[in-house]
Structure formats: C-alpha cells, structure tokens
Image (cartoon, rainbow, N blue to C red):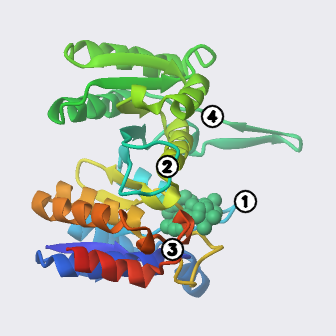
C-alpha cells in the first residue's frame, strides 16, 4: 500500500525519517510517496501546498504528515487548517495515554479527545471593522456537531469506554455552544449504556489538572479541543507524546499534535514518539492492528528505560538513537 508522506518543517524531517525507518522495519509492505509542503517549498515556489501534494493525497487517501509552521500575521493560512477544510477531515482524534516510566504529573492515564475539526473560530472568518476593531465569527452547525459527537460515542461503544464528556461554554455562548450541547444531548440518548457528562471548558481545564481520571472519552469544539489537548499532553509528559488523526469520509491525515519546534530543529533532539503514535493510529485505520500493537508495545518498552529518554523527557537520547532502540525492541 502506498502512503503519502509530508516531512514538513522544523523537526518534521527528523521525526518523519524516524517514522519511516520504523515502519520499514515492521515490514508490512508500506511504500512511501514523499511530497513537500511548508516553509521550504514556499521559499522556493511561493506556495505552501504545491499541486503535486494535493494529487498525491487524493490518489493515496492516507497521509503521514510532519508539522508545518504557520507564519503569524496577515496573508498566511495554516496549511493544516487548509487541508482539514479542503478534505473535510471533520474528526480530530487525540489519544492521551501514559507510556513506560516517563516522569509525568499523572500515571496510568488513558483519555481520548474528539475535536471537531472544520468550524468554530478556527474557520478563520475574520473581519477588520476599523483600525481599532476586528471581529472573528464563531460558526457551529448542527450537522458538523452531530458527526463529531456521534464519532465519539461510536468509539466509546466499540472500545468499551465508560463515559463521554461534552465540553462547551454554553452558559455564555448560548447560541453556538448551546447548539453543540443540544446536539450532544440528543446523540447521547441513543447510547443509554454509555454515561454522558457535561462540563464547562473553564472547569474542565481545572478538573483535568486535579482529577483527570474521572474522564474517559471527551468531545468538544475546535478551539477548546486544540487547547485542552495540549493541556492533556502535559499530564502524560509533554507535547512529544500525543498524536492526532484527522479523519474524513475519504481521506485521513495522521500527525503529531505538536508543531515544528523551531527551537530544537536540526539538532537531533526531537522526540519522535508523538508521530510514531500517529503511525499507530494510521496502522489501525488501514486495518494493520497487529503491526500497530507491535509498535505500541515497542514504544512502551523503550520508554520504560530512562536511558532512552530524549531531552524533553529529561534524558539525553537523540532522535536517531531512539529510533534504533524502537527498531531493536520490535
Ligand atoms: P511547538 O509544538 O512546535 O513547540 C512547543 C514546545 O514543545 C517547544 O519548546 C518545542 O521544542 C517542544 N516540542 C514540540 N514537539 C517536540 C518533540 N517532538 N520533541 C521535543 N520537544 C518538542 O509549538 P510552537 O513553537 O507554538 O509552534 C511552532 C510552529 O509549529 C508554528 O509555526 C505553528 O503554527 C506550527 N504548528 C504546526 C502544527 C501542525 O503542523 N499540526 C501544530 C501546532 C503548531
């Protein structure tokens, strides 16, 4: 099977090289079609996503993507947001799970966040009203809310999870968040065996810090999901450990939650675990469950030895050294 590989910016080439070597070691017949998007291509061609990237994605349907930087300010649209919108990748699924013996605030955590991926303030509908006023429009639709909430409940059902918690700020944004909550309540009624909980996003941020194990599956809007999943990554040891799947009807893109980490790029310090867990999500998606379990177990073994910890985990292991250790554990 051929998979599109976008190395991306900053630490992207280093962590995707690691992913590629490890998948090759799994020896399950995956071939890569490497296409470039992001800053380097922009500097050469003036476009962040050249046409051959779209062609490759549309042909192969499954994509492994390194992080791509988004220049802050006017005139640039995030490549990530553009791809999510173009291919209607409506579900952003972020598992947050404790691994090995990584020093972390919480042990044995196993949460999964379903983030709506196509609308909300992320739709980027902004307007300059005057020199001292700008507006950003929050868009929430019944149909997009329903499909992400349903995705979360279906996951909970198939994977025997106990509860689904919907996170909003419906007390303040009565129409938009109110709609999301109303839809969630309706879908929840169809799944009587799964406990349904509602919580406001500010309280959620605190509860995740003081008692995260009260949660299981979490479903929320785009911006809250963006922020809460970074917070959740912090609970299990940091951004280097959490992957994200962007799922649409036809096309799916797998990546790490973190960005291009320009502060450590090119130094061999990046922790590839997040993208490797993204590879596990990808392998599950293409029905290679045996291979994804082998890789998850290898990561757990490697991350149970502090000699293998990269700098973000308080160790000295390099990206290449970590990759070798995972291949050995496989
Ligand atoms: P970031 O996630 O790149 O980095 C935040 C901190 O975490 C940095 O100190 C970094 O060194 C560290 N870190 C991140 N990933 C790591 C890893 N694998 N191993 C070790 N340390 C790691 O966030 P940022 O600095 O706010 O963003 C940088 C750029 O990335 C921005 O242009 C942003 O738009 C982009 N970004 C892209 C994506 C994506 O492609 N999906 C996601 C988020 C941010």
The residue shown at (48%, 78%) is 317
Look at mark 4 in the image and give the residue it sits on: 137
Quarter of the image where the N terminus is located = bottom left
Circles 2 and 3, Cβ within 8 Å, touching? The answer is: no
- Is 315 situated above or below 250? below
Query: Circle 4 sits in a helix, a strand or a loop, which is it?
Result: loop
Q: Residues within 10 Å of mark 4 (few under 14, many from 20)?
A: few
Is the distance from the Cβ of mark 3 to the nearest ligand 1 atom less than 8 Å? yes
Look at mark 3 in the image and give the residue it sits on: 270
Q: Is residue 9 left or right of residue 108?
A: right
Q: Position of residue 320 (x, y in %)?
A: 41, 84
The residue shown at (42%, 75%) is 15
Query: Circle 3 sits in a helix, a strand or a loop, which is it?
Result: loop
Q: Residues within 10 Å of mark 1 (few under 14, many from 20)?
A: few
Q: Earlier in the sequence, mark 1 or mark 2?
A: 1
178 and 54: which is toward the camera: 178
Q: Disc 2 and disc 4: Cα gap in Å? A: 28 Å
Work out which residue is located at the far right of the displayed protein and give it: 132
Q: Earlier in the sequence, mark 2 or mark 3?
A: 2
282 and 313: which is toward the camera: 313
Q: Quadrant of ligand 1?
A: bottom right
Look at mark 2 in the image and give the residue it sits on: 233
Q: Earlier in the sequence, mark 4 or mark 1?
A: 1
Q: Earlier in the sequence, mark 3 or mark 1?
A: 1
Q: Is residue 187 left or right of residue 181?
A: left
Is the distance from the Cβ of mark 4 to the nearest ligand 1 atom less than 8 Å? no
Q: Is residue 149 visible?
A: yes
Q: Position of residue 54 (x, y in %)?
A: 35, 69
- Is 264 situated above or below 169? below
Q: Is residue 61 visible?
A: no
């Amino acid at each position: 099977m051929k998979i599109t590989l976008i190395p991306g910016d900053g630490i992207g080439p280093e962590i995707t090289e690691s992913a590629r070597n490890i998948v090759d070691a799994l020896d399950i017949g995956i071939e890569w079609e490497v296409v470039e998007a992001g800053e380097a291509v922009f500097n050469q061609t003036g476009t962040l996503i050249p046409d051959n990237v779209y062609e490759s994605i549309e042909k192969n349907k499954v994509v492994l993507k390194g992080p791509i930087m988004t220049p802050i300010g006017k005139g640039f649209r995030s490549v990530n947001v553009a791809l999510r919108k173009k291919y209607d990748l409506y579900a952003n699924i972020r598992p947050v799970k404790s691994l090995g013996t990584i020093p972390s605030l919480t042990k044995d955590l196993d949460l999964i966040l379903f983030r709506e991926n196509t609308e909300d303030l992320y739709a980027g509908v902004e307007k300059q009203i005057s020199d001292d006023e700008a507006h950003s429009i929050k868009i929430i639709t019944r149909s997009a809310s329903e499909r992400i909430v349903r995705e979360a409940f279906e996951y909970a059902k198939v994977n025997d999870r106990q509860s689904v918690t919907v996170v909003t700020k419906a007390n303040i944004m009565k129409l938009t968040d109110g709609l999301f909550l109303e839809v969630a309540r309706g879908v929840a009624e169809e799944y009587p065996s799964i406990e349904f909980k509602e919580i406001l996003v500010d309280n959620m941020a605190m509860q995740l810090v003081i008692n995260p194990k009260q949660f299981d599956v979490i479903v929320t809007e785009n911006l809250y999901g963006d922020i809460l999943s970074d917070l959740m990554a912090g609970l299990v040891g940091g951004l280097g450990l959490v992957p994200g799947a962007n799922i649409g009807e036809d096309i799916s893109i797998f990546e790490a939650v973190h960005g291009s980490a320009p502060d450590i790029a090119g130094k061999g310090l990046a922790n590839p675990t997040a993208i490797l867990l993204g590879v596990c999500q990808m392998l599950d998606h293409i029905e290679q469950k045996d291979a994804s379990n082998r890789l998850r177990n290898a990561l757990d073994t490697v991350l149970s030895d502090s000699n293998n910890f990269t700098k973000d985990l308080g160790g000295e292991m390099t990206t290449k050294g970590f990759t070798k250790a995972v291949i050995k554990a496989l």
